[in-house]
Image: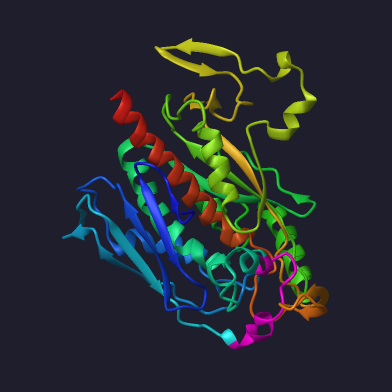
Amino acid sequence: MGNTFGHLFRITTWGESHGGGVGVVVDGCPPRLELTEADIQPDLDRRRPGQSNIVTPRKETDTVQILSGTFEGLTLGTPISMWVKNEDMRPAAYEEMATKFRPSHADYTYQAKFGIRNWQGGGRTSARETIGRVAAGAVAKKILQQRFGVEILAYVSQVQDIAAEVDFEQVTRAEIEANIVRCSAPAAAEKLIARIVEAREAGDSVGGIVQGVARGVPVGWGEPVFDRLEADLAKAMLSLPATKGFDIGSGFDGIRLTGRQHNDPFRAENGRVFTTSNRSGGIQGGISNGETIYFRVAFKPVATVMHEQDTVDVTLHNTTLKGRGRHDPCVLPRAVPMVEAMTALVLVDHALRHHAQCG
């Protein structure tokens, strides 16, 4: 079913927002990779709630435990199971949602599909499910960095109509992590933070864009025709909660150019082929061309707002509902490690597939 992602490097996430915990099983990780909880925890710390005044105040340490798949600090080549205990559940805040569907949430569609749903914090539809993805992504990032020299970064580039000018070729993780909104342009970051605080104080929410970057990806990753690298990246990103759009390279902006303007000219130097521009976003014909891969992911405003809104109840009568509980006024700062994780999961899977077929 839809809880498993990947082909050779496969992950299955499990757990609900207010259940005992959430986690992931990773299958296909190569053996003899050095791996402990210390490799996983930093990315979970970047994803966890309560880390600043512009994210949900839910207090979770999100401490990861590796339950299987390693021995004496090395992977065994067998399934790696990891879990994080839920510690700060407050299901009573969601009791009204047991009988009412929250606007723009998955409450109604889950009820219509399955005839049952976990209404406590959204259950399986909660962004808390992404803990498993981020944990698995940390494993994937370590493989990509150590074995292939691939670096993966993501950062917030826009909140509503406020955009930051960032050079994706030069941005560093230290610059991204220098502020709570995870935007590497300091002046813009202040404006983005102010806009998020404004929305939170108004009981509202805002959306924006996360830019993803993968540097050092070798030529040849990606599969024709249905498993094109950009197609798998798009699926990965649009599987994240609250995503509404994806584009790569020039993306939608490319329609303003002619073919002559848009093409990336090839050159060769010292036995290496490269392009003098990169409007393709590092992928051509669904296969990586050796240039930096870059793309954008659009996240909608958080659906829960602290205002009365029209809805229906489980008996299909019209009613109203006001948001309660603890919620992010903007998902973007915590979405950054999620975008990195899904990028890593796609790339490591294609790396293994390429080497299995082409050596």
Compared with residue 185, is residue 50 higher up or lower down, i.e. above or below? below
Viewer-proximal residue among 88 and 164: 88
Q: Where's the C terminus, which quadrant?
A: top left
**How far across and how far down the image is residue 333, in percent?**
60, 60
Compared with residue 150, is residue 127 higher up or lower down, i.e. above or below? below
**How far across and how far down the image is residue 304, in percent?**
71, 71
Viewer-proximal residue among 166 and 70: 70
Which quarter of the picture shows residue 41? bottom left
Compared with residue 357, is residue 154 higher up or lower down, i.e. above or below? below
**How far across and how far down the image is residue 238, in percent?**
60, 49
Residue 61 lies in the magenta-colored region: no
Residue 102 lies in the magenta-colored region: yes
Residue pushed farthest bottom? 92
Viewer-proximal residue among 303 and 71: 303
Residue pushed farthest left? 72
Q: Is residue 168 visible?
A: no
User: Magenta part of the protein: which range?
Assistant: 92-108
Q: Is residue 319 visible?
A: yes
Which quarter of the picture shows residue 179? bottom right
**Number of disc labels:** 0
